Every structure is written in structure tokens, then in C-alpha cells.
Image: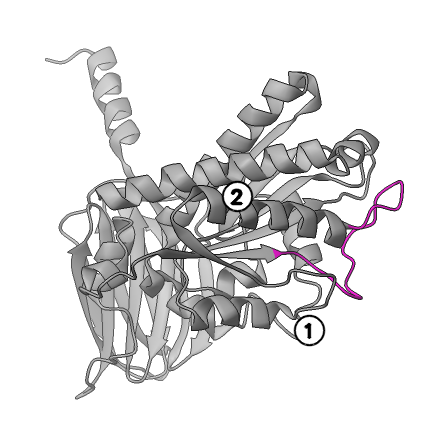
């Protein structure tokens, strides 16, 4: 007979090994919807059921994932209100999590495993055909693995990679203003120019700048340029600012929901010129997974952040160069581009020490060189994959 301690250890081990639902992504199409459930570990024996509307309840589809728990980043209620999908409720039931999907009409429901640990749920109306505009299971599997979809589809690569360097703000959009009157737009342009020049001189790449002088370029045009030219990489360069005068440091962003309140604040400031745009309503968000860039962008953000901080600390005392790490947020230019993309915040113009360094040509060049080193390392890894 097992001792109580042995039973407790077994129970604790079971809890520790439980998979966690990390993200839920919804793609709504005509008569067809796909729901991607990204888990921390493999999930088996998924159960599905559908039911028509009754006098007291709407049509529903339910999916039970045994042996998992809902992660903190997953909402209990996910409102959709699009293409016949009303909302999704995510509730822990018994030994797992149940998805209850409220529908405008009855649908068949099927699930399949994709990637190493994700579940893809398909909801189809009666006699409805699959919507070809939605990402396929193969697309999603490629994205989960960080594989370029153009490479997967056999599209021949161009002879030279194309990098779009985006200098934030410009013209009447001066961005943040520093304690000594430093304009974010000017700092971003200086670092972007140096980055573009170093990319052309040191790497076997072509470079396009979204602006090379002090002019206003709408955010949508910056992203459209990169998409139209089918760029391999998009680098958006900015200087940071905070409501206080003590925040300082370097940080690099890739695309996802805001990491924290500060990340959301930075995104709101940088998105201010995208009039009428909302991260809650933009249909592009429903297509992001098909771009196959999420993991690649995160890898690039990490490489840039690590390189820049390391190079700056070779020049300045460690205490003066604060490493704020990599973060995520819904920046307009990152949402709208279809290639790996990052947004780099060089330092804070709202902090006197950071502002002084941002104005120094040596700081600007050191930062640019470090960005180029990071891009070089990142591109070499892509060749090896």
C-alpha cells in the first residue's frame, strides 16, 4: 500500500506535467472557421461535439482537451462576432479544458494535431466547403516551426536579400521630444541612415529606406512599401520616451499582444499617426499566422537586443546601458508587414543621460553596427535551415 507521501508526490508530478494552453488564434472565413490552440505539450484524446440551436440556447460546438490547463494569457471569454462565430468560452472542466463555441448556426466540428503540441479545430457549415483564404494546416505547421512559407512553397529566392530600414516618424510627426529638445524623428533617421549604409557596405543585401530625409511618411505606406517589394526583413528604428524622466534603456519589439502595460503604452505612442486603426478590428490580425514570421521575428529581436547592449557596454559603463530586453506589442508597422519585422527603441529621449548619448554620433554608429552584426548572424542562421 502506498504511503500518503507517495500518493502526494504522484499527484504533484501530475500537476507539474500538465500541458498549458498558451495561445488561441481564430480565423473566420466564409462558412468555415479555424481555431488554433497552441499548447506547451502534446494533447491527446481530444473530444468534439456539436449541437443545433434550441429554444433556450444558441448553436454550439464543444471541444474538450484532457490533461491541460488554461494559461494566464488565455481569456476565459473570447468575443468574435464575425462570420457566424459569436464567442468562445474557455473553461477548466474536470481534468482538462473545454472550449464552448457559440455559433449562429449548427456546424460540424473536427480537430487535428499540428506541429509538436498544437490543436487545429475546424468548424464547417452544412455542405460548406473549406475557405481557401484561411491558412492551411501546412501553413500553420510551418509557422509553428519558424519556417519561411515562401521557401516551403518552393519560391526561388532572389539573388540578394532585401532589407527595408524604417526611420520612425518624420516631417510634422516629430515623435517624442527630449529634455533638451531632441526630436525622436531626428535620432531615428540618423541611426537608420547609419544602419542602412553599414548593411550595404558589409552584407550582401539590398537596402531600401522608408524615408532618407525629414519628411512625413504614413505608417500604412511604410508597411506597403515593404510588402510591395517583397522584402526579406523590416527594421523599424525609434527612440523611446516615458511620462517620467527616470526610465532609461534599450528594448526591442516583435509582434504579439503587449507584454505589459509599458509595452502597450509604447505601442500606443508609436501608433498615434495611424488614424482610425485599431488592433481589435484590423482584419490583418486574422491572417498573421499565414505569414510564417512570428518565431523568426522573435529570434531577430533577441539577436538585435543582445548585440546592441553588449556593444554599448563595451563603450559605456554597464550601469549606464540598461537592458530592457525583448518585448512584444501590436505596432501598426509590424502588424501590417508580411515578413520578419522588429521595432527597435534605441534609448529614452525623456531621460537626460540617454538623450545625451542618443545625440552622440559615436553612440549612433555603435548602435547601427551592432544592429548590422545581429542581422548578419540572423541571416546566416536562415541559410543553414
Residue nearest the viewer, comparing 367 with 243: 367
Residue 242 lies left or right of residue 288; in this view the side is right
Q: Are marks 1 and 2 in contact (CB under 8 Å)?
A: no
Assign the C terminus to one quadrant of the image: top left
Across and down, in percent, residue 269 comes to: 71, 56
Residue nearest the viewer, comparing 363 with 33: 363
Residue 76 lies left or right of residue 185; in this view the side is left
Residue lying at 24% horizontally and 29% vertically, measured from the top left: 14
Could you tell me what secondary structure mostly forms the magenta stretch?
loop
Residue 170 within the magenta-colored segment of the rendering: yes
Residue lying at 72% horizontally and 36% vertically, measured from the top left: 361
The quarter of the picture where residue 32 lies is bottom left
Across and down, in percent, residue 325 comes to: 55, 33
Residue 95 is at least partly visible in this image: no
**Alpha-carbon distance for marks 1 and 2?**
33 Å
Residue 282 is at least partly visible in this image: yes
* Label 1 secondary element: loop
The residue indicated by pointer 1 is 275
Q: In the displayed image of the protein, which residue is found farthest to the bottom? A: 127
* Label 2 secondary element: helix
The quarter of the picture where residue 340 lies is bottom left
Position of 235 relative to 149 (above/below): above
Q: In the displayed image of the protein, which residue is found farthest to the left? A: 1
Across and down, in percent, residue 37 comes to: 30, 55
The quarter of the picture where residue 365 lies is top right
The residue indicated by pointer 2 is 198
Which disc number belongs to residue 155?
none
Position of 314 relative to 370 (above/below): above
How dense is the environment of label 1, judged by Cα within 10 Å: few (below 14), some, or many (20 and up)?
few
Q: In the displayed image of the protein, which residue is found farthest to the front? A: 201
| Highlighted range, magenta | 167-183
Residue lying at 71% horizontally and 22% vertically, measured from the top left: 320
Amino acid at each position: 500500500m502506498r504511503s500518503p507521501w507517495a500518493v502526494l508526490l504522484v499527484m504533484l508530478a501530475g500537476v507539474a506535467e500538465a500541458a498549458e494552453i498558451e495561445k488561441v488564434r481564430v480565423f473566420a472565413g466564409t462558412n468555415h472557421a479555424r481555431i488554433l490552440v497552441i499548447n506547451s505539450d502534446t494533447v491527446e484524446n481530444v473530444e468534439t461535439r456539436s449541437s443545433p440551436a434550441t429554444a433556450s440556447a444558441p448553436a454550439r460546438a464543444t471541444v474538450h482537451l484532457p490533461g491541460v490547463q488554461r494559461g494566464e494569457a488565455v481569456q476565459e471569454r473570447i468575443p468574435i462576432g464575425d462570420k457566424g462565430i459569436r464567442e468562445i468560452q474557455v473553461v477548466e472542466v474536470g481534468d482538462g479544458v473545454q472550449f464552448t463555441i457559440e455559433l449562429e448556426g449548427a456546424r460540424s466540428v473536427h480537430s487535428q494535431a499540428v506541429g509538436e503540441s498544437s490543436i487545429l479545430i475546424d468548424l464547417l457549415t452544412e455542405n460548406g466547403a473549406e475557405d481557401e483564404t484561411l491558412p492551411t494546416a501546412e501553413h500553420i505547421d510551418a509557422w509553428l516551426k519558424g519556417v519561411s512559407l515562401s521557401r516551403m512553397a518552393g519560391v526561388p529566392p532572389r539573388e540578394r536579400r532585401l532589407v527595408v530600414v524604417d526611420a520612425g516618424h518624420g516631417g510634422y510627426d516629430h515623435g517624442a521630444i527630449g529634455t533638451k529638445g531632441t526630436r525622436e524623428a531626428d535620432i531615428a533617421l540618423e541611426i537608420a541612415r547609419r544602419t542602412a549604409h553599414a548593411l550595404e557596405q558589409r552584407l550582401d543585401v539590398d537596402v531600401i529606406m522608408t524615408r532618407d530625409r525629414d519628411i512625413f511618411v504614413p505608417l500604412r505606406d511604410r508597411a506597403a512599401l515593404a510588402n510591395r517589394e517583397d522584402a526579406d526583413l523590416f527594421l523599424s528604428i525609434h527612440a523611446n520616451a516615458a511620462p517620467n524622466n527616470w526610465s532609461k534603456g534599450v528594448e526591442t519589439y516583435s509582434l504579439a499582444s503587449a507584454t505589459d502595460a509599458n509595452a502597450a503604452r509604447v505601442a500606443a505612442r508609436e501608433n498615434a499617426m495611424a488614424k482610425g486603426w485599431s488592433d481589435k478590428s484590423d482584419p490583418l490580425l486574422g491572417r498573421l499566422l499565414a505569414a510564417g514570421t512570428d518565431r523568426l521575428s522573435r529570434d531577430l529581436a533577441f539577436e538585435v537586443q543582445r548585440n546592441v547592449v553588449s556593444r554599448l557596454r563595451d563603450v559605456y559603463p554597464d550601469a549606464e546601458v540598461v537592458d530592457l530586453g525583448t518585448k512584444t506589442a501590436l505596432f501598426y508597422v509590424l502588424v501590417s508587414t508580411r515578413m520578419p519585422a522588429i521595432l527597435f527603441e534605441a534609448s529614452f529621449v525623456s531621460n537626460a543621460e540617454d538623450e545625451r548619448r542618443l545625440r552622440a554620433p559615436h553612440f549612433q554608429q555603435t548602435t547601427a553596427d551592432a544592429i548590422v552584426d545581429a542581422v548578419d548572424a540572423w541571416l546566416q542562421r536562415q541559410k543553414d535551415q
